[in-house]
Amino acid sequence: MAYGLSVLDLVAVGEGHTPREALRTSALLARLAEARGFRRYWVAEHHSMPGIASSSPAVILAYLAAQTDRIRLGSGGVMLPHHAPLVVAEQFHTLEAMAPGRVDLGLGRAPGTDQVTARALRRTDGPATGDSFPADVAELMAFLDDDFPEGHPYRRRVHAVPGPVQGDSVGRPAVWLLGSSGFSARLAGLLGLPFAFAHHFAARNTLPALELYRQSFRPSPALAEPYTVVGVFAFAAETEEQARDQARTGALTTVRFRSGRPGLVPTPAEARSHVFTANEQEILAGWLENAVHGTPDSVRDQLDTLAKYTDADELMLASNAHGLEERLMSLSLIADSYGLPHAGPWPA
């Protein structure tokens, strides 16, 4: 296979389910992904969304680190403008100490929520613009490496712990930049970092952003050549109808969020019976156009096409669907369609 497969988990909470059940399913999904040879398992940061339980990536990753042994774990991503770089460095050095050599620190500049919630997170009345993102990334990397330049007020005075100040045995998480536009794509290229693009909600920008990243790329100690991951909604089921039903639950969730009415992920029956307004129909059509869903062979064909179209090194599969068991089955069916081996048992 010319590209790798990974998983992006929003820890979706569906109608009739609880956050505890959603988190338990995430642990099972991570163990399944590990057993089937997926490269990495990332969790996203979202806030004030009833249908998503992934507001605290570092906490969830610690939970998943205790449940897995080999698969890379990471944030897809930490929305850095909400956090002090020192705190993020300490959290992810701690994770690296828990799961040495398999932690990814994916960084984003988007709010990951609405503007009012973003103001509550940042404790400021100003708009959530992300203008300080390049400086925040630079400060975070300096904390990760314990390497501020001479004359900087933090040099030799402020250290992220766990961290290099405690000795060479403390590892460093791999830093990624995430984006849905050219801003982070260009910054990732200039810094020589791997780049993950959110094709699942910004498909029109996919090719321009990836091209800008590759054109801007400068080799760095972290990376000699450009490396790209493309995020895509993907859901497989035994029949096209079953897959479409689960895909529509994720679509209706998106419609409600963009209309200012976020809620739990609806059931397939609710999604089938929902009467979409003209504006909602436009959102629905755009979402379904870029989502991959169907029988396992159909899903693989669509993913092959996307990988060829984007020349991605990895595709990262997101599944913001309603059913807990259905999400586990979808990942198994996709793994089967690629002929991925069963590397070990995983408890159901």
Image (cartoon, rainbow, N blue to C red):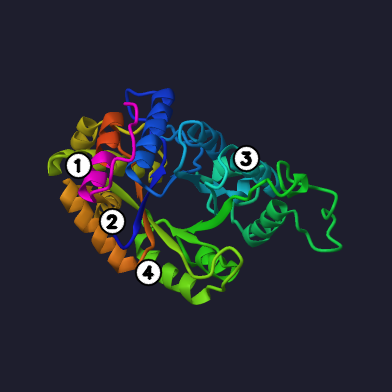
Label whose residue precedes the other's in the sequence (2 or 4): 4
Where does the image place residue 325, in percent across and percent down from the top left?
Answer: 27, 30
- What is the quadrant of residue 336 in the picture? top left
- What is the quadrant of residue 303 in the picture? bottom left
Where does the image place residue 85, in percent across and percent down from the top left?
Answer: 68, 49
The C terminus lies in which quarter of the figure? Answer: top left
The residue at which mark 1 appears reads as 243
Which kind of residue does numbered mark 1 sit on?
Ala
Q: Which mark is residue 290?
A: 2
Crowding at dot 3, Cα within 10 Å, few <14 / some 14-19 / many 20+, comes out as some
Secondary structure mostly seen in magenta is loop
Where does the image place residue 57, in percent across and percent down from the top left?
Answer: 53, 39
Nearer mark to the viewer, of 4 and 3 = 3
Report if residue 333 is visible in the image.
yes
The residue at which mark 3 appears reads as 97
Q: What element carries label 4?
A: helix
Label whose residue precedes the other's in the sequence (1 or 4): 4
Instruction: State the CA–CA distance, disc 4 to disc 3.
Output: 36 Å
Give the residue drawn at x 59%, y 51%: 128
Instruction: State the CA–CA distance, disc 2 to disc 1.
Output: 14 Å
For the residues labelled 1 and 3, say whether their Cβ atoms are less than 8 Å apart.
no
Q: Which of 157 and 182 is in front in this view?
A: 157
Nearer mark to the viewer, of 1 and 3 = 3
- What is the quadrant of residue 23 in the picture? top left
Q: Nearer the viewer, residue 151 or 18?
A: 151
Instruction: State the CA–CA distance, disc 2 to disc 4.
Output: 14 Å
Which kind of residue does numbered mark 4 sit on?
Leu
The residue at which mark 4 appears reads as 207
